[in-house]
């Protein structure tokens, strides 16, 4: 307990000792994972939309929304320097003037962050200087989610433009496109198979006027190389907001606006589903 508004993002460090959360209550908080004790409170001028630890667990980043007259910022704190936390003074703060950040992850080796924007742009920001290293725009609408591959050489984006796209993590070169008929809210890469799973569906405000069949609430599987859809999994009766693979690649979970988290176990080689929880 602690936040007084919707929690928009959550991340654990590499050894799961600490958890970082960002909220609509204009704060980012650091917690002890085992006890739930709040270790740090970082106040902001607007809602915190994305947050994350670097791979050493020493540096955190979070982005704030563009709202109430305040622009979007990305802030970086070094947890090894208590004065930054005590004084609420990040060692670097990057303004994002054009469109707000809607999703962000740390890039390879923790040297940069990869951020997706409301307008469909992708930016790679240096974690040392704050400069924009690479800028591309392959999406035409908001980027809802970014997830890295296991070896961090690639990442997949999910967008309101009804597509998910595969990019190179270092150059941001566009590699593949996975097309659907509805907004894509989340996409994940299998850790050991050439599989991509997409979740989404008709936007929430339109759901009440639509049947679950027309709403397209299935999780959809695509082949990573051939960009072809080879399977759909029903279950949710509302849009899917998030998807994630298990590290062994033999199950995945999905969270939907219907209030359910579903875990599906399957044989990835033959795509035969065994059971769901």
Image (tube, rainbow, N blue to C red):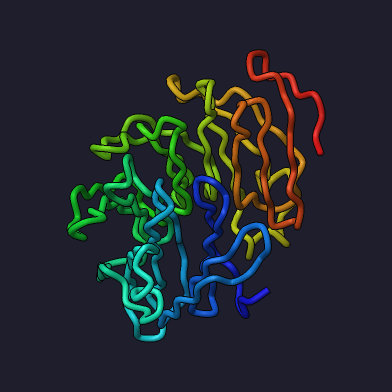
Q: Is residue 267 above or below residue 20?
A: above
Q: Nearer the viewer, residue 150 or 38?
A: 38
Q: Nearer the viewer, residue 101 or 36?
A: 36
Say which residue appears at 22% left-offset and 50% top-offset. 135
Write down the quadrant of residue 34 in the picture. bottom right
Say which residue appears at 81% left-offset and 39% top-offset. 277
Say which residue appears at 62% left-offset and 26% top-offset. 248
Q: Is residue 95 left or right of residue 183?
A: left
Q: Is residue 64 left or right of residue 171?
A: right
Q: Residue furthest bottom?
A: 69
Q: Residue furthest top?
A: 270
Q: Nearer the viewer, residue 59 or 218?
A: 59
Residue 59 in picture, x, y percent from top left: 37, 58
Quadrant including the N terminus: bottom right
Residue 40 in picture, x, y percent from top left: 50, 73
Say which residue appears at 60% left-offset and 49% top-offset. 242
Q: How many marks?
A: 0
Residue 109 in picture, x, y percent from top left: 32, 41
Q: Is residue 275 left or right of residue 101?
A: right
Residue 155 in picture, x, y percent from top left: 40, 38
């Amino acid at each position: 307990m602690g936040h007084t508004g919707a929690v928009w993002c959550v991340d654990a460090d590499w050894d799961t000792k600490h958890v970082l959360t960002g909220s609509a209550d204009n704060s980012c908080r650091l917690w002890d994972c085992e006890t739930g004790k709040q270790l740090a409170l970082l106040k902001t001028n607007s809602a915190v939309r994305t947050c994350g630890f670097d791979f050493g667990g020493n540096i955190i980043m979070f982005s704030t929304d563009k709202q109430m007259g305040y622009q979007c910022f990305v802030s970086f704190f070094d947890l090894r320097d208590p004065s930054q936390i005590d004084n609420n003074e990040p060692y670097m703060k990057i303004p994002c003037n054009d469109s707000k950040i809607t999703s962000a992850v740390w890039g390879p080796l923790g040297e940069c962050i990869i951020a997706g924007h409301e307008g469909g742009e992708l930016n790679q920001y240096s974690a040392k200087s704050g400069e924009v290293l690479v800028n591309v725009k392959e999406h035409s609408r908001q980027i809802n989610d970014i997830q890295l591959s296991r070896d961090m050489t690639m990442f997949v984006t999910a967008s309101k433009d009804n597509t998910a796209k595969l990019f190179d993590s270092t150059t941001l070169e566009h590699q593949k496109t996975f097309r659907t008929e509805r907004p894509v809210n989340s996409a994940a890469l299998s850790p050991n198979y050439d599989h991509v799973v997409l979740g989404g569906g008709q936007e929430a405000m339109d759901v009440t006027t639509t049947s679950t069949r027309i709403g397209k609430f299935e999780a959809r599987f695509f082949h990573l190389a051939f960009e072809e859809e080879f399977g759909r999994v029903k279950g949710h009766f509302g849009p899917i907001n998030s998807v994630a693979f298990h590290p062994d690649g033999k199950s995945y979970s999905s969270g939907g606006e219907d209030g359910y988290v579903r875990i599906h176990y399957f044989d990835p080689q033959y795509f035969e589903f065994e059971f769901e929880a």
